[in-house]
């Protein structure tokens, strides 16, 4: 099965600072998803990446999938307290209709005002 | 667009009692459906997934079972809850090449 390793496990930054979260896969990534979660709540979809070298941005969050499709990074520019939460990367490595989304263990982000 | 409904939001159950969590899908037909658990720590563990009515795949051996009696209904059950069943349960759905949509979750505490 596909294993995803996220780093760092937790991160504390001062408001306004930039930060990067990494997600490394044990296998080739066919679909890489980034989600954000507030503790005890559901997951909020951020972005999906499929092509090697692909980069997507939404507001101050940018995600990239490397050319070899085994690593993704999530970059937040000028962080704000609203960015705080748990960031999860997920991947579904199966083809056809039997998609199975598995997750890394998450990165807990704290943004201090 | 697809919406996942889960209830209840929180549940406190005694050890040995039965469990039934329901997940319903709105806005799409024939989705793949998933049950996840988030225990202590932050990772989400895939418990079950279903590609159609009556079709259930189990990812990990456990005290839980799942059923899909209708296309847009996915149920997570247990005959006798254990303390270790406590956690945050999330239902998710996927249709075709779209993304995965998650419900708001149920926090289960077994006492």
Image (cartoon, rainbow, N blue to C red):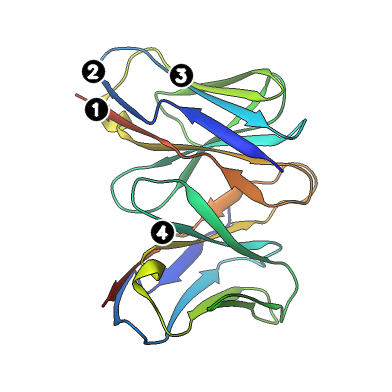
Q: Residue at x 52, y 54 (%)?
A: A44
Both marks 1 and 3 on one chain: yes
Q: Tag 4, which chain?
A: A
Disc 4 is placed on an element classified as loop
State the quadrant of the C terminus of chain A. bottom left
Q: Is residue B59 above or below residue A54?
A: above
| Residue that lies at the very extreme toward the left in this rendered image | B111
Q: Position of residue A83 (x, y in %)?
A: 41, 69
Counting residues from the start of the chain, the first of labels 3 and 2 encountered is: 2
The quadrant where residue A27 appears: bottom right
State which chain disc 2 sits on.
Answer: B
Residue of label 3: B77
Left or right relative to A71: residue B51: right
- Report, in whole angstroms, how far the alpha carbon at label 1 lies from the one at label 4: 22 Å
Q: Mark 3, chain letter?
A: B
Whether callout 3 and callout 2 share a subunit is answered yes
- Kindly indicate whether the residue at mark 4 contacts the one at mark 1 (C-beta within 8 angstroms): no
- Estimate how packed mark 2 is, as few (under 14), some (14 to 19) or many (20 or more) residues with alpha carbons within 10 Å: some
The residue singled out by tag 2 in the image is: B15
Q: Are marks 2 and 4 in contact (CB under 8 Å)?
A: no
Mark 1 lies on residue: B83
Q: Which mark is residue A105?
A: 4
Among numbered discs 2 and 1, the one appearing first in the sequence: 2
């Amino acid at each position: 099965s596909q294993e995803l390793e996220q780093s760092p496990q937790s991160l504390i930054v001062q408001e306004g600072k930039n930060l990067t979260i990494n997600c490394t896969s044990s296998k080739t990534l066919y679909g890489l998803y980034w989600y954000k979660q507030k503790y005890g709540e559901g997951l909020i979809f951020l972005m999906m990446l499929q092509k090697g070298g692909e980069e997507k941005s939404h507001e101050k969050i940018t995600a990239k999938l490397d050319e070899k499709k085994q690593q993704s990074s999530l970059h937040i520019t000028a962080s704000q307290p609203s960015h705080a939460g748990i960031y999860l990367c997920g991947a579904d490595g199966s083809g056809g209709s039997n998609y199975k989304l598995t997750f890394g263990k998450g990165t807990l982000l704290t943004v201090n005002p | 667009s697809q919406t996942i409904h889960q209830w209840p939001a929180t549940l406190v159950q005694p050890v040995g009692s039965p469990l039934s969590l329901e997940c319903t899908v709105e806005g799409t037909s024939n989705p793949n459906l998933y049950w996840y658990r988030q225990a202590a720590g932050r990772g989400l563990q895939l418990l079950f997934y279903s590609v159609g009515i009556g079709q259930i795949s189990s990812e990990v051996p456990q005290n839980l079972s799942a059923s899909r009696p209708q296309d847009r209904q996915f149920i997570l059950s247990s005959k006798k809850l254990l303390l270790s069943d406590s956690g945050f349960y999330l239902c998710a759905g996927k249709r075709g090449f779209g993304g995965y949509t998650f419900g708001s979750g149920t926090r289960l505490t077994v006492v």
